[in-house]
Amino acid sequence: MQYKFHLNNLAVAPRKVRAVADLVKKMPVKDAENQLKFLDKRAALPVLKLLKSAAASAVHNFNLSADNLFISNIFVDGGPMLKRFRPRAFGRAAAIQKKTSHLTLILEEKTPTARKMKTKTKTKVAVKEIQGGGEKPAAPKYETPKEIKPARKLGGFTRRIFRRKAIG
């Protein structure tokens, strides 16, 4: 069975990450870790962290053995590009695209084993009853609307001073 793991928005260009990812494709997890530890490329560390995290998740969540896992596939897609500008001559600006990457790592077992999922057991929490002075009076579900007062009419003097239309 295949197990997918993702790393999104890595701030390294996809072309540079692909060079690292292609080295470890189809390798066992332990060999790939050793390969990435000693690889002198900037993209090697994030790929190594993804690989370690994926192996730990597979062991913890799916009860798999780390020695039985290998990298079935790893592929790198382009992420969103950040647009930046660099000043140039004569008041112009040149656009710069800071590229990002999305990694998808697919782990698989060398020899398939019967998979047992861990089940969470729910513990029942004892509820204590509070002994008080009695029950609260039942409040109505909906409040009755308050009386609406009619709008106050302006007096004679105020009506003469503040009119809607100018007297012409």
Image (spheres, rainbow, N blue to C red):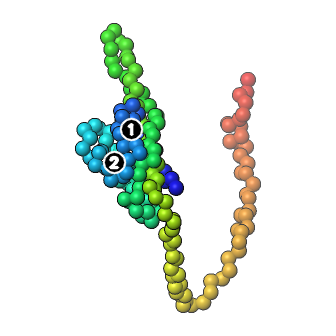
Circle 1: is it few (<14), some (14-19), or many (20+) Cα within 10 Å? few
Which residue position is annotated with label 2?
Answer: 32
120 to the left or right of 164? left
Quarter of the image for residue 19 reads top left
Decide if residue 159 is in sight here.
yes
- Tell which of 104 and 144 is nearer to you: 104
Residue that protrudes farthest toward the front in the picture = 111
Please, what is the three-letter code of the amino acid marked with disc 1?
Asp
Q: What number is the disc on residue 45?
A: none
* Picture coordinates of residue 61, whole percent (x, y): 46, 63
* Picture coordinates of residue 78, whole percent (x, y): 46, 34
At 44% across and 43% down in the image, what residue appears? 74
Query: Which quadrant is home to the C terminus?
Result: top right
84 to the left or right of 141? left
* Picture coordinates of residue 38, whole percent (x, y): 24, 44
> Which tag, 1 or 2, sits closer to the chain's start?
1
Q: What number is the disc on residue 22?
A: 1
Secondary structure at numbered mark 2: helix
Secondary structure at numbered mark 1: helix
Decide if residue 5 is in sight here.
no
- Tell which of 152 and 98 is nearer to you: 98
Q: Is residue 101 above or below residue 128?
A: above
119 to the left or right of 40? right
- Tell which of 104 and 107 is nearer to you: 107
At 44% across and 31% down in the image, what residue appears? 81
Quarter of the image for residue 53 reads bottom left
- Decide: marks 1, 2 in contact (CB < 8 A)? no
- Tell which of 154 and 85 is nearer to you: 85
At 34% across and 44% down in the image, what residue appears? 46
Label count reads 2
